[in-house]
Image: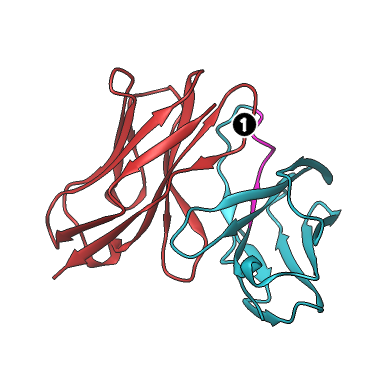
Amino acid sequence: DTEVTQTPKHLVMGMTNKKSLKCEQHMGHRAMYWYKQKAKKPPELMFVYSYEKLSINESVPSRFSPECPNSSLLNLHLHALQPEDSALYLCASSQVEGVRGNEKLFFGSGTQLSVL
Amino acid sequence: AQSVTQLGSHVSVSEGALVLLRCNYSSSVPPYLFWYVQYPNQGLQLLLKYTSAATLVKGINGFEAEFKKSETSFHLTKPSAHMSDAAEYFCAVSEATGRRALTFGSGTRLQVQP
C-alpha cells in the first residue's frame, strides 16, 4: 500500500463552522505534512509532524489546528475560517522527516475546501 | 535561504516533440533537487530527485534532468512528449542542513498538442 488517503475530497463550510480534514497512510512513514495549495500556485508548507510530534509550524493562523493521533493518522481541524482560506489542502508523508533532506514525499489527492 | 525559479509558467509542445522545463536554484549549501508532477485534481507525484550521486538523473515516464552546478540549473527533459504528459510540473529544493523542508517553485503547466 503506497497511498496517502485524504477525506473528504471536497468540503464546503461556512465561516462559523467547525470541520476536520483527515489523512491516513499505512506505509510506516513517521513524518506527515500538511500543505496548502491555492489555484495555479505551488504547495505551501503548513505543518510537519515527526514521530507524532509537531516539528514545523509555518506561522499558520490558529484557526488551523493540526493533530496527529498516531503514526498513521493526521488531522487538520478547521474553525472560523475565512473565504481566503479556500484552497486545496494536501497531506503528504515520508519515511522520516528530511533527515538527509532528500526524503521522497508521498502526496494524497487533497481536499478541495471552499469557505463561504 | 533556498529557492527555485521555474522559467515559463506555460509550455506548449506538439506530441512527439522534445519537452524542456527549466528550473534554476539558489542555495547556500549543496542542494537536493526534485521534480514533481501534478495531474488535474490530484496530489503531487515524484518524477525524480538529485542527491549528488550522479548529475544526470533518470526518472519515471521517460523524464530525466541534469544537475549543472556552474549554471545552478536542474532542467527537466523528455525526448518525445505524449498527450498523457500534460500536467503541472514543480521543481523543488531542500538542503542537507538547516531547514530541510521542501520549497517548491511556482510551477510550469505543460500542454501537449496533437
Is residue B58 or residue B67 the one in the foreground? B67
Left or right: residue B11 compared with residue A44:
left
Q: Position of residue A38 (x, y in %)?
A: 53, 62
Q: From the viewer's side, name the closer residue of B43 and B2.
A: B2
- Which residue was labeled with disc 1? B100
For label 1, the SS is: loop
- Which residue occupies 29% across, 61% down? B85
Quadrant containing the N terminus of chain B is top right
Chain under numbered label 1: B
| Residue segment shown in magenta | A91-99
Q: Is residue A51 visible?
A: no
Q: Residues within 10 Å of mark 1 (few under 14, many from 20)?
A: many
- Which chain appears red? B
Image quadrant assignment for residue A11: bottom right
| Residue A92 located within the stretch drawn in magenta | yes
Q: How many marks?
A: 1
Q: Colour of chain A?
A: cyan
Classify residue A64 as left or right of residue A109: right
